[in-house]
Amino acid sequence: MRVMVVWCPDWSVVAALDEAGRSNRSPAAVLSANVVEVCNGPARSEGVRRGQRRRDAQSRCPELVLLPANPDRDARAFEPVLALVEDLRPGVAALRPGLLAVRAPGSWYGTETAAAATACQVLVEGGVWDVRVGIADDLFTAEQAARTADVQSWVVVPAGGSASFLRGLPVHVLQDDGARGRDLVGLLQRLGLRTLGDLADLPGDAVEHRLGSYGAEVRRRARGEDRALFAARTPPPELDADVSFEPPLDSVEAITFSVRTTAERFVDQLAHHQLVATGVRVEAESDGVVCSSRAWLHPRHFGARDLVDRVHWQLQGAGVGGSLRARKQSGTVRAPIDRVRFVPEVVEPAAAHGEALWGAASDDLVERGVARVQGMVGFDAVRRPVLQGGRSPAARQSLVPWGERAVDLRPVDRPWPGRVPGPAPVRVFATPPVAEVVDDAGREVCVTDRGVVTGEPRRFRVGSGSGGQGLPWQPVTAWAGPWPTDEGWWSGGSGPSARFQLVGADGRAWLLLRAPDGWSLEAGYD
């Protein structure tokens, strides 16, 4: 098996400069722990080297662009390169960002030289300027051949010629193996070994005894006997599903009816791979341009009916029923639709969403009923409460549209100092009514800046009591608090405030808030 290796030098710098929108001709270096991890050609020409400290690198090149290390960014940027090579020859293995291996596709292109030239041409046309290709009998030799090639060029090692090709290479090529390689290079140089040929000529038993198993493995590489294999990645399955309309449709009902079969096919092909979608993007095109796109989340997983409902709600926009032309001002679509596409954004194993022992028929009936109501009054008009973190009862609940997954909620497991302990109140007033709380002398009970209560609550009432407004005064039989908070002062919020639990003579308990502007009734424990 012949191996082809594609090498894109200084890939971390290339990806970082592209993300930052900087020119690749600028001297740049990627730093990790204030040490140069990778530098590009312009930086090396100024004396910057890998392993230098930040201060030393800047002293040699004051205009050096310093970039943070980010392996995830490098991998994302290298994905298009993998896809381009994968189109030429399936079975690509990403060794690391900037370096990939694949079985040499010589017979597909006539000769291995033609295959290497084709790979270089495709990658250069794809925007990868510095690309080098090496082909040999084993992975190590093919990588070294790629590293000795010129820009946009290739080196093909003849079959059986790996040992002779590697003999003249210096031992410092082993530094790319990481810390082990750098330590071994230093030891070999102290022993007077300068090339891989010098290492290959040593007896195998002596090398393993002196340098260990890693040293014996490196010796086998130097002799062209590399046994390393690479695991080719499996291309991800195409899970998208789309339907085209000819002629284009301008009615929401017609589009909704026409996408049913496609929605069923989308769900079936996910099930074929034992997957379900919990996040789906619905895209609608007009004249080949995406005119409506929205990502939908599901609290469980999408079925065909759920997808059809989402298409209806998305294209319907702010109106209900009728044609798209009649809703140019209120809807999200302004032209007839010629294509609808379902793109899975979040997929999970189907085993994680298995039904209960007795099925989920009752849940399905409830969801279908709520979906019909949403179709009449609008998607955002039907909401469900979701618990989130917060200090006040009102802040601890969030309303989420039915069928949509709750996102961006405040975490519940945080301490939330000043939160009133349970049990939670039964009623929370959307607009807290004004209240009054006084002590034995009839003075209003206040809370100081240090959280000290100025008097013991004895009576309270809801409302101002003037002009016949409000409820009569009621004695306080028990009270607890205060729970002081100081939140929202930077945005005009309530500022320093405190909450009290009061029990009236009728046995009902209430949660009251003392804010700088007075008392208010937040909730009731009916």
Image (cartoon, grey):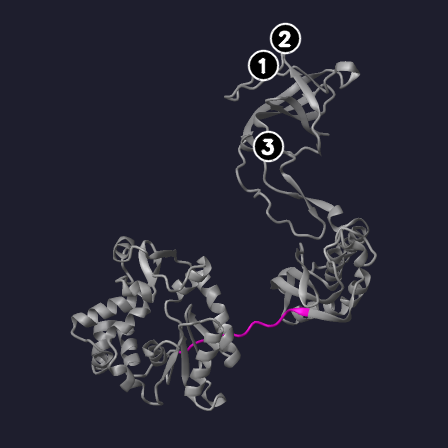
On the image, the x and y values in percent for residue 344 come to 63, 64
Pinpoint residue 230: horizontal percent, then vertical percent.
43, 76
Q: Is residue 321 above or below residue 226?
A: above
Magenta stretch contains residue 491: no
Give me the C-alpha separation between circle 2 and circle 3: 30 Å
- Which of discs 1 and 3 lies nearer the camera? The answer is 1
Q: CA distance from mark 2 to mark 1?
A: 9 Å
Label 3 sits on residue = 421
Could you tell me which secondary element the residue under label 1 belongs to?
Answer: loop
Which residue sits at x=48%, y=75%? 125
Q: Mark 2 or 3, which is nearer the eye? A: 2
- Which contiguous range is marked in magenta? 229-241
Q: Helix, strand, or loop for circle 3?
A: loop
> What is the distance, in whole Å, between disc 1 and disc 3 at their CAs?
23 Å
Q: Magenta part mainly helix, strand or loop?
A: loop
Which image quarter is the C terminus in?
Answer: top right
Q: Position of residue 41 (x, y in %)?
A: 33, 67
Mark 2 — residue?
441
Q: Classify 10 Å Cα crowding around label 1: few (below 14), some (14-19), many (20 and above).
A: some
Q: Mark 1 — residue?
A: 455
Give the percent coordinates (x, y) of residue 306. 73, 59
Other residues around mark 3 within 10 Å, as few (<14) / some (14–19) / many (≥20): few
Q: Nearer the viewer, residue 109 or 138?
A: 109
